[in-house]
Structure formats: structure tokens, C-alpha cells
């Protein structure tokens, strides 16, 4: 209580001093005669707080702090207790006691007042009873204007300030439940020039019995931390949203969307025309101003009314303009303030000046889009609805987003170029049309992947073989891009070369496996030779003979082929899967089947039946269903298969080859057994001539007789029994002679006096093509010649 003890006084119902103690005289310096009968309010340095005024009206006991004026004029803080008493006339008299707070109490009070964090104390009814100077600054009002009001209440007490509604509800909850509650708010306090992020602690205040008698509100300004988190979150979000597709224009749109959703009111993105035309971009150009195309624009207003240039329009930037300087220097520029914006951005463009004026643009940034040392475009960001101007942190954020977008644009540009090269290479390597042959009717489809992986190494082929036969091939190289397409081309060429040798399917795949291993070793020379299988592939090779209707096939890790016979349902042929190409050391197996004429074969790559949301078995089931009713046109069946299995955005390339088998009737094939007797050569010529007459191909008799004479003579002289002569009338006239010898003939240069050595040279010159193939019992020498024009 200090040296003055407890000062006491009495005040009547009209507020006049009735009694004055000696301690009161010593505390305030006023003698009794100087204060008795005078209004007690004259002693106050500040008006009573609203809570005290309410107690005077009720009346009720009140305890609190007041500031009084000492006789010598200095202010003095007292702890005051006011007790209402009623006299005989039932009028309220007030008995007052006052003490000087102890030093510790004063220190607590000073700490509250001088604490840099805004603090306010509320009574149990939610009315403010005390605030510190920091709170006064935030709210823009003195303590006596804040005391007696609820959180966020306007100066006249008629409404709740915007943004404080949720905080008022939180205060009521703490007073009701007695639970401490954190509260985060983004609001514009009346005493602050802009919005701030506040981390507010609401703590109940309890008396000695534990009853809630009030609440303490402390507010920490967390704006910097909040903005830093928001920027970090925005940058993280941009990593998912910007560059979601490998499309240049869509990437520009995504940049504009992210910026307007978070910190800009209007954004335009301009890309160099050379970027959109897939050329190397450079700034400055060799001559003239760089040409841009408006790639994207977005606004918080509907329809982008601020825009001067429509999307897709070509335009340029003057070198002296802010965008021009940003482009030529490669550094982002920021201009804030309506006067500065009008001066810097509106010069030389009346239309732009009117837009800036009409929408009140007060802050703009020009940020170049640069990636890998190349300028690709420019983004312009503006604020007109957001009251705060852009600051340096916003400029850094815009530069970060622009850098991410530029990298995505450059990746998209490079991907588009590589995809075009790979697709062009792929299409140039794929057959343009089926070779002229009568063994099968074919239809095919190729669909490149739409994913970021790029074009893959899927291919198919139809190869005309000797004896009216045809080879059907489908393969898939591991990987994507130009390298996969190039590898596909090499393997396709290798298959064609091996097919010309007329190898059986299993032997052809064995040779192809060796080629893949060699390619893999070559590719590892610059890296490491310890990772075989880097260039892997799958392949299915099949041969169909329309004379015997025999179909043979072998697989190297490829999906099974399907067949639909004219009288049956779709099924998958039992052909051993075999290892993928590039593994090495494992065997392949050939399976043989006899197919009725009109059977439909389906060869495809795994992209058709496999997808991220579908396993192989489900895909094969869908393919089987799609092949039902494959007796119609093959082109329609192709569309039906793709419509049933093709996803909207294929993750892998898809190749599909359908082939309907045909059969040569007996009237198109003539076969004779040839005895190992040189005198039968003349008879063989006669048989061939008579058959050509029956086929009405007399014009081909001369050449055919020479071919038959040479091939039969060679078989009798160098081969072994049994010997067989066969003529086939297909899309060409085919002459075949088979024997039991495995020694293949070859052309040689005959000297002047040699009696032999000219036969095969004549055959090669008189026919379209000739060759030999090994069979299970020996070999077959064949020659083809064009049919005479009808």
C-alpha cells in the first residue's frame, strides 16, 4: 500500500464529495476543505472507463484502475474500489477506497502498455476493459475509445468491422467454454495501411475460484511468415500446374492462371513467333523488332477487358518501352504508382493509355521468359483491383514462375520437334501400302503415344516371300523418341533381309536376337558394357502359305496373336512366348497351324491391350470381344478394335495389323515329280508349255521354258532325288524346282571356253527376281516373272 496507506472518501448520489480521509489528503495533496462538496469527477485526470460508468448506473461494486490529478498537477494511477451504500432515503452513497499499486503491479501495467504486441483485456461479457499502446496503433483509436466495446466494433458501436466477424465469434466461444483458442486472420485493421496476417491468441482469465472473469487477446503480426508460406505454396503448386502438358500454348495459359489466382489482377503471356514456329529463338533479332504472338491472357474480370491485343495476334514491343527494355536486358522491371505507370507504360499507345486509366492500373511488372540462356517470350502482370502495389518480393515470385514456365515451354518446344522427327522417321519406315500379293488381305493402324515419353519403336510389316507366301511381322522396341524409332528402322531392315533368306520363324528370331545384342554392345561402348538388354525389343514373325494354307509363327516376348476363323469365335493361337530380343542364349519355337480360307489374323503391340488402368488379361478379353464379327471389311474391324481398346490419351504407341487369309485353288498350281534323268528336261519344258497354254499365258512360254530347263538341269546334275517342279500363277508367274540337296546355287562368271556357268545368269536377267530357300528336306530354287498384260 506504500507510505500513504489506504485513502478513503465518500460521494453522494449527485457525485459530490461528502467525506475525505487523512490518507486521501496525504495521497493527493488536497485538504478536506478544498474537496468537500465539490464533484468527485474534478479529481480525475481521465474519464472513468465504460465498465465503471455502467456500475454507477446499475449500481454495483466496481474495482479497477483510474488516473487522478495530484494537487501539484502530476498524474497518479490508483487502484480504486467503489462500494454502493443506501441511506435512509434509499439514495445511493458511494464509499471509495484507493491505493497506490505496488511496484510489481505497476511494472505489470507498464509491460502491458509498452509491449510491442497488440494486447487487449476483456471482461466476462466480452467488453474491452484495457488495451495497450500497440493495440491503439493497430486499431487507429485511443484506449478510451476502445474500452467498453466488443472486438471489431465500429467507432459508433453500430456494426462489426469487415473481417472481424469470425474473431468476435472466437472471443465469445473462449468466454463461454474457458478454453484457450488460437485464431488466424487476414484482415485490414483500421489503423493499418494494408491487410495483415495475424496470429491471435485468445486466453481466458480466471479468478481464485477458477471462474472465467475475462479474457486476454494478444495478436502477433505474422504477415511476412504468411506471405513466405503462401509464396512457397504457390511455387510448389506451380510445379504441378505449369507444364502439365507438353503444349506450348497450354503452358502459357497455365502461367497466366496461376498468377491471377494468387497475386495479379491481369496477366498476359507473349511468346516469340520463332518459338511457336519451332525455330531457335534469340533476342535481339538480326534485324528489326522481334515478333511476338499473344499466347495467353487472363484477368480477375470476365473476358479480359483490360487487354489491348487479342490472343493469337502477332505484335512487337518498342525497344524503349518497359517490355522492350526487359526483353533486351533480360531483367524483370517493376513500376508502381498510377502516375509512374501512366508515364512509363502508356507512352505512344493511346489505346493502352485508355485501358490503364479506365481500370486504374497502379502497378505493373514485365518479366522475360528465359530458359537455357534463350529468351522465349515475356509475361506482363498488372494490379488494379488489389490495392497494394507489387513489391520486390512479388517481382522475385514472378521471376521464379516465369523461369519455371520458360523451362516448360522450352521442353515442350524440344519435345514437339523431337516428336515430329521421330514420327516422321517412324512413318517413313512403316510401309506405305501392302505389297502386291494374293496370300492375304490386310488393314492396319498406327497410333503414336500422346504422353511425354514421345514416339516409341512400334512397327509392323507385310513381306512378300517366294512361292506366293507372305510374312507378317509386328514388333516393339523398348523406349521412346528418335533413338527408339531409329532402332526400330534397323530391326525392320534386318527382318526384311532375313526374310529374303527365307528362314523359318524361330531361326529368324534367333538371328534377330543376335543383331539386337550387337546393337546393345555398340550403344554401351561409350558407357558401360555391363548392362545387357539396354536395347530390348519384342517381335512376332509369321509366315502364311496360300497353297497349303499352312501358317507358322514364333514369338519373342510379344503378346499372343489372335485368329478368327470363318466358323468360329476369336481365340489366341498357342505360340510359345519366347524371351524378348536382346536377352540372348534362349531358344525360340515355331508353331504351325492349318487355317481355313477367310481366317482373320490380328497382330498388335502391347500398347493396344495394356494401359495404366488395365492389365493384360482384361485387355486381351476386350480384344477378343472386339474381334467378334470380323467377317466384315477389315477397315471397319480396325476401327472397331481401336474404338473398344484405345484410351483417350494412349501412354504407349499402338500398332495393329489385321490379315484375312486367301487360298490358291488347285487350278493355279501345277506340280510334277521329276526323275533324276537328264533326258526328262525336254519333257519338263513340254509340261510347262502345256500348262501355260491352259492358263492362256503362251506369251510367257519362251522365258518359262528357259527357266525350267536351267533349274531342272541344275537339280538333276547337282541335287538329289526326290526332285519336284512346280508352277504357280499368282500375282506373278512362279517357277520352283525342289531337290534334297542343301547346297544353294550361286551365279559365277563363265569364261570364253567354259561349257557351263551361264544358266543362272540368264535366269536372273530374264526374270523379275530369283532365289533359293532351305526346306526340311533340302532346298527350293525359284524364279518369278511378271504376268503378261491382258
Image (cartoon, helix red, strand yellow):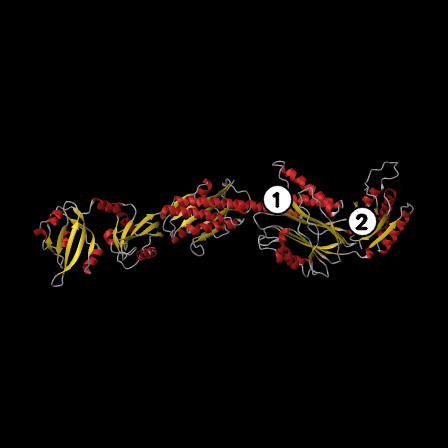
Q: Secondary structure at mark 1?
A: helix
Residue at point 32% right, 49% down?
219
Q: Residues within 10 Å of mark 1 (few under 14, many from 20)?
A: many
- The spot of residue 371 in percent (x, y) is 50, 42
Q: Residues within 10 Å of mark 2 (few under 14, many from 20)?
A: some
Identify whether 751 is placed above or below 124.
above
Q: Which residue is mark 2?
A: 785
Residue furthest front as drawn: 209
Q: Earlier in the sequence, mark 1 or mark 2?
A: 1
In the image, taking residue 94 as reference, residue 665 lies left or right, namely right
- The spot of residue 497 in percent (x, y) is 73, 44
Residue closest to the eye, 445 or 555: 555
Residue closest to the eye, 627 or 707: 627
Q: Which residue is mark 1?
A: 482
Q: Secondary structure at mark 2?
A: strand
Residue 388, label in figure: none
Discs 1/2, front: 1
Estimate the spatial distance between the alpha carbons at disc 1 and disc 2, rounded to whole Å: 39 Å
Amino acid at each position: 500500500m506504500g507510505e500513504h496507506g489506504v485513502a478513503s472518501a465518500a460521494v453522494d448520489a449527485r457525485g459530490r464529495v461528502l467525506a475525505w480521509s487523512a490518507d486521501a489528503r496525504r495521497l493527493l495533496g488536497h485538504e478536506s476543505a478544498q474537496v468537500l462538496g465539490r464533484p468527485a469527477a474534478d479529481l480525475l485526470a481521465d474519464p472513468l472507463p465504460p465498465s465503471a460508468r455502467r456500475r454507477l448506473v446499475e449500481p454495483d461494486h466496481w474495482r479497477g484502475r483510474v488516473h487522478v490529478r495530484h494537487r501539484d498537477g502530476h498524474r497518479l494511477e490508483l487502484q480504486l474500489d467503489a462500494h454502493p451504500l443506501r441511506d435512509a432515503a434509499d439514495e445511493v452513497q458511494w464509499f471509495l477506497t484507493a491505493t497506490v499499486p505496488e511496484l510489481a503491479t505497476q511494472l505489470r501495467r507498464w509491460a502491458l502498455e509498452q509491449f510491442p504486441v497488440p494486447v487487449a483485456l476483456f471482461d466476462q461479457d466480452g467488453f474491452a476493459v484495457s488495451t495497450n499502446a500497440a493495440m491503439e496503433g493497430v486499431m487507429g483509436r485511443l484506449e478510451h475509445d476502445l474500452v467498453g466495446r466488443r472486438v471489431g466494433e465500429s467507432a459508433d458501436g453500430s456494426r462489426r468491422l469487415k473481417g472481424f466477424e469470425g474473431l468476435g465469434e472466437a472471443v465469445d466461444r473462449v468466454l463461454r467454454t474457458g478454453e484457450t483458442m488460437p485464431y488466424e486472420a487476414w484482415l485490414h485493421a483500421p489503423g493499418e495501411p494494408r491487410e495483415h496476417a495475424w496470429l491471435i491468441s485468445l486466453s481466458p482469465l480466471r479468478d481464485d475460484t477458477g471462474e472465467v472473469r475475462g479474457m486476454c487477446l494478444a495478436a502477433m503480426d505474422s504477415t511476412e511468415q504468411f506471405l513466405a508460406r503462401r509464396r512457397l505454396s504457390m511455387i510448389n503448386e506451380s510445379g504441378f500446374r505449369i507444364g502439365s502438358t507438353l503444349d506450348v500454348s497450354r503452358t502459357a495459359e497455365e502461367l497466366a492462371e496461376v498468377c491471377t489466382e494468387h497475386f495479379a489482377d491481369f496477366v498476359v503471356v507473349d511468346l516469340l513467333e520463332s518459338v511457336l514456329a519451332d525455330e531457335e529463338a534469340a533476342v535481339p533479332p538480326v534485324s528489326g523488332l522481334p515478333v511476338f504472338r499473344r499466347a495467353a491472357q487472363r484477368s480477375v474480370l470476365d473476358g479480359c477487358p483490360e487487354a489491348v491485343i487479342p490472343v493469337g495476334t502477332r505484335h512487337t514491343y518498342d525497344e524503349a518501352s518497359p517490355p522492350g527494355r526487359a526483353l533486351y536486358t533480360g531483367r524483370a522491371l517493376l513500376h508502381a504508382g498510377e502516375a509512374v505507370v501512366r508515364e512509363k507504360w502508356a507512352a505512344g499507345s493511346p489505346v493502352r493509355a485508355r485501358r490503364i486509366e479506365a481500370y486504374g492500373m497502379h502497378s505493373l511488372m514485365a518479366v522475360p521468359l528465359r530458359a537455357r540462356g534463350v529468351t522465349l517470350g515475356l509475361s506482363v502482370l498488372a494490379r488494379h483491383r488489389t490495392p497494394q502495389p507489387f513489391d520486390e518480393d512479388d517481382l522475385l515470385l514472378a521471376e521464379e514462375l516465369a523461369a519455371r514456365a520458360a523451362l516448360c515451354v522450352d521442353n515442350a518446344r524440344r519435345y514437339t520437334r523431337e516428336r515430329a522427327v521421330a514420327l516422321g522417321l517412324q512413318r517413313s519406315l512403316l510401309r506405305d501400302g501392302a505389297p502386291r500379293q494374293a496370300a492375304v488381305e490386310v488393314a492396319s493402324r498406327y497410333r503414336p503415344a500422346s504422353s511425354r515419353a514421345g514416339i516409341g519403336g512400334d512397327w509392323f510389316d507385310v513381306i512378300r516371300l517366294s512361292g506366293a507366301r507372305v510374312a507378317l511381322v509386328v514388333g516393339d522396341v523398348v523406349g521412346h523418341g528418335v533413338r527408339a524409332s531409329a532402332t526400330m528402322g534397323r530391326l525392320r531392315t534386318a527382318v526384311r533381309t532375313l526374310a529374303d533368306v527365307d528362314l523359318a520363324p524361330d531361326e529368324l528370331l534367333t538371328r534377330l536376337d543376335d543383331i539386337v545384342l550387337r546393337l546393345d554392345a555398340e550403344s554401351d561402348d561409350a558407357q558401360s558394357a555391363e548392362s545387357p538388354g539396354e536395347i530390348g525389343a519384342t517381335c512376332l514373325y509369321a509366315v502364311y502359305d496360300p497353297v497349303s494354307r499352312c501358317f507358322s509363327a514364333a514369338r519373342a516376348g510379344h503378346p499372343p496373336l489372335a485368329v478368327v476363323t470363318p466358323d468360329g469365335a476369336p481365340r489366341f493361337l498357342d505360340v510359345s512366348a519366347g524371351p524378348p530380343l536382346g536377352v540372348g542364349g534362349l531358344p525360340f519355337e515355331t508353331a504351325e497351324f492349318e487355317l481355313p480360307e477367310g481366317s482373320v489374323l490380328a497382330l498388335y503391340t502391347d500398347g493396344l491391350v495394356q494401359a495404366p488402368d488395365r492389365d493384360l488379361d482384361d485387355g486381351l478379353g476386350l480384344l477378343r470381344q472386339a474381334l467378334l464379327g470380323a467377317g466384315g471389311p477389315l477397315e471397319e474391324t480396325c476401327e472397331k478394335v481401336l474404338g473398344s481398346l484405345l484410351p483417350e490419351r494412349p501412354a504407349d504407341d499402338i500398332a495393329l495389323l489385321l490379315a484375312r487369309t486367301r487360298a490358291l485353288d488347285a487350278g493355279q498350281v501345277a506340280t510334277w515329280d521329276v526323275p533324276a534323268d537328264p533326258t526328262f528336261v525336254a519333257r519338263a519344258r513340254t509340261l510347262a508349255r502345256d500348262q501355260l497354254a491352259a492358263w492362256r499365258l503362251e506369251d510367257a512360254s519362251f522365258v518359262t521354258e528357259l527357266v525350267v530347263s536351267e533349274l531342272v538341269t541344275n537339280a538333276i546334275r547337282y541335287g538329289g532325288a526326290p526332285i519336284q517342279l512346280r508352277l504357280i500363277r499368282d500375282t506373278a508367274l512362279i517357277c520352283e524346282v525342289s531337290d534334297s540337296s542343301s547346297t544353294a546355287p550361286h551365279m559365277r562368271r563363265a569364261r570364253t571356253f567354259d561349257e557351263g556357268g551361264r544358266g543362272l545368269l540368264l535366269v536372273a536377267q530374264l526374270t523379275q527376281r530369283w532365289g533359293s530357300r532351305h526346306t526340311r528336306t533340302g532346298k527350293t530354287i525359284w524364279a518369278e516373272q511378271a504376268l503378261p498384260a491382258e
